[in-house]
Image (cartoon, coloured by chain):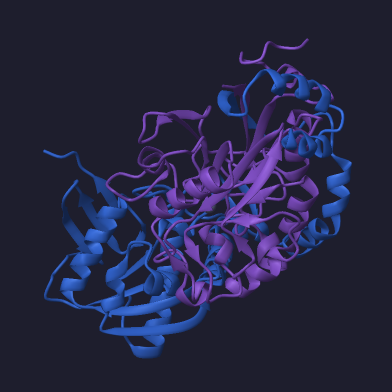
Amino acid sequence: MLATAGSLYVPEWLHGRSAGYKRGIRILHTNDFHSHVDPFPANHPLHANMGGIENLRSLILDNRPLDESFLLLDCGDIFQGTPYFNLFGGVPEMIWMNHAGYHATTLGNHDFDNGVEKLAELLKHANFPAVNCNYDFHETALNNMVKPYQIFKRSGIKIGITGVGIDLDGLVQAPLRKGVVYRDPVEWVQKTVDHLRKKEHCEMIIVLSHLGYQYPGNKIDDQKLAKATNGIDLILGGHTHTFLDEPVKFKNISGKEVIINQAGWAGLRLGKIDFIMDHI
Amino acid sequence: MKPILLWQRIFPFGVLVFGILSGHSCQIKKVSYAGGENLKVISTAKYDTLTANLIKPWRDSVAKSMKDTIAYADSAFLPGMPEGNLNHLVADLVKEEADRFLRDTFGYPTHLCLLNRGFLRNPLPKGYITERDLFEMMPFDNYLVFVKVGGATMDSILNEIRIAGGAVIAGLKMEIRKNEYFNAEIGGFKFDSRREYWIATSDYLLNYGDGFFSLKSAMIKVYTTKNIRDITREGMKAETKQYGKLLYHNDKRITLRKND
Ligand SMILES: [Zn+2]
């Protein structure tokens, strides 16, 4: 049962559920939930009967290892899209995410749709942190409410999680994002990753991104971020509502592997990614 | 051996196994990708009653206030780029009301209606369309605004439609290639850069862009308190009342041409 040290050890939970300590980490993730609490209606032309928080939670429970060696993450745009948000301003979504047991999220452009103050109010109810490293919130109600990063320990590994957001100019009405300063994603992600690796001694780095999967030209996206940086293991994305069959591999600036994934939108997909640990 | 104390606290049952392992290997740990997939969220046999109970008060309230039927469609309306029948439906309903309002208040006609594709978040289903369908199709509280633009600004806007790869548009016909638009017609007449045009759009698009930044340089801006969702609802109701269903607007407005 004991693997020889230094070799690859495939955790039992990759093949099924079992209790106890295992040397692996599973990431479950969503993005662009957009207040889709209920499944799509039976007459919906594209997603009939799909999604819905009961179904999403069943899937989370079925796929999460019992030994807590997992993280449930979200990449922003939690709000805006169904009457739940128009009527209740984001409260049911926060109740849902607490109930589902999310460990962290980042912020999307639509999370600002009712303004910075309302967002700060909602985040007070969250049992999980919101992370972002490239928005400067010092002049806003979100100061100290959104963390540049959060460190988790899973399976004996220190995992640093940061978040990165899209330029809100042209996306969010100016009064609603008053005081929020957008800073260069590549520069601030790299700065944060370096800090997490060198100062905090993290052994795994995950970036929660709301930049978008891919754009033509030089507009920053997850793929460009992966290629221009160092030290990231996994980029979980959002904003472009991209449906990928499975995570995609890219090479970072030093030629090392970076994984990118995005899970559609509206709670229609749950991303599931496994990492295993190796002692060098 | 300090790290083990920390793991001990987190993994009281697993610490022994790990203690042995870490004794054999050095402390640098490396993670490697071991596979992944994106699971479809569909209904399963195991209904999650706990979650259902938790959300029930909110769900009941949404169901109650969103149940009214507002229109009927004998097949679905889909949003699209460069255009879609949902784009056309919404743009036509908004332009019709905008034109009436602007004529009544200021005596000017509305030449075109321009909204962004991102404004439409979901298709309209086939069958009876409820208030809820309307909110999910158009969740944003955007308000009708009018701008009067000169020919040069109009030209920039036509280019912005080309760059966006389409829009939600009424009163305009154009063809686009990679680097240019051509054969533009506004209100049935060839686009004339010496003319001035009244455009009905949203406060969001006017002030915050989504790629349509030229609207800002309009010579006149008129704000209204008319919510575009309310305009759309009334238009859909009226059309269903008159014709028994929503009408399809299948005319070609934006045509993509291959680069020659
Ligand atoms: Zn989104």
- Front-most of residues A231 and A140: A231
- Front-most of residues A224 and B237: A224
Q: Residue at x 51, y 78 (%)?
A: B226
Q: Is residue B148 above or below residue A173?
A: below
Q: Residue at x 58, y 36 (%)?
A: A203
Is residue B133 visible in the rendered image? The answer is no
Number of labels in the image equals 0
Q: Residue at x 88, y 45 (%)?
A: B50
| Residue farthest along the front direction in this orientation | B1
Name the colour assigned to chain B in the rendering.
blue
Q: Is residue B82 above or below residue A259?
A: below
* Chain that the image shows in purple: A
Horizontal side of A257 relative to B122 (left or right) equals left
Q: Is residue A120 above or below residue A31?
A: below
Horizontal side of B74 relative to B14 (left or right) equals left
Measured as percent of width and height from the top left, residue B213 is found at: 30, 68
- Front-most of residues A37 and A71: A71
Measured as percent of width and height from the top left, residue A102 is found at: 72, 47
Measured as percent of width and height from the top left, residue B211 is found at: 33, 61
